[in-house]
Image (cartoon, grey):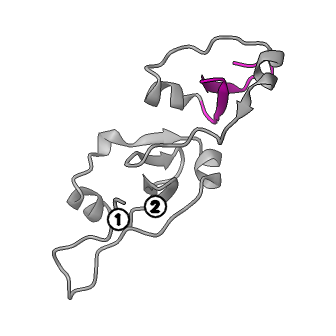
Amino acid sequence: RSPDGNIWYIADGAKSRIPHPIFLTLYFNARAPIAISQKEIDAMETLETYKLRDGELVKGENYPDVYVVEHGELRPIASGEIFEAMGWKWHNIVSLPDTFVDHYPKGDLIEMPSLNQPDTILLTNN
């Protein structure tokens, strides 16, 4: 943690900002950040901000919409029926602050395909 309160992931002399403390629970076994001087932080190369991982299920604290992360974007899931058809579990949804969800890049809606293709659901995993 830098003196200004930012939390960073540091590896090989480079840093990526962790945008929310929930990331520590999700990806770092809830480890507490270690204090580091601003001089040390400033001397490191800055990489892009740490992102949610593909496949993560998230929602805002006060919004009912649920998203799946794909290629760095939140893809809204059109209905509970589709959510369950994909095999996702409701207890795996992570609640994040609404402002975090509001400002995260959004992708295409995940919805049921046309009636011509009833056995497929639109979702790319590439």
User: Which residue is found at the position 81% from the left and 25% from the top?
Assistant: 42
Left or right: where does residue 104 sit relative to residue 113? right
Q: Which numbered disc covers residue 112?
A: none
Crowding near the residue tagged with mark 2, few <14, some 14–19, many ≥20 C-alpha atoms within 10 Å = many
Position above or below: 75 against 3: below
The quarter of the picture where the C terminus appears is bottom left
Residues under labels 2 and 1: Cα distance? 11 Å
Q: Nearer the viewer, residue 95 or 56?
A: 56
Instruction: Work out which residue is located at the far right of the displayed protein and give it.
Output: 39
The residue to which callout 1 is attached is 124
Q: Residue at x 24, y 58 (%)?
A: 86
Left or right placement of residue 7 versus residue 119 in this view? right
Above or below, 107 against 36 in this view is: below
Identified by mark 2, the residue type is: Arg
The tag earlier along the polypeptide, 2 or 1, is 2
Closer-to-camera residue (92/11): 11
Q: What secondary structure is marked by label 2?
A: strand
Q: Residue furthest left?
A: 119
- Residue located 31% across and 39% down the image: 91
Residue 77 point in image, percent of width and height: 39, 62
**Numbered label tally:** 2
Please, is residue 40 above or below residue 111 in the view?
above
Residue 97 point in image, percent of width and height: 59, 41
Mark 1 Cα-neighbour bin, 10 Å: few <14, some 14–19, many ≥20: few
Q: Which residue is mark 2?
A: 75
Q: How far across and down, in percent of the image, does residue 92 sit? A: 33, 40
Q: Is residue 61 magenta?
A: no
Q: Quadrant of the N terminus?
A: top right
Q: Which residues are magenta?
A: 1-20
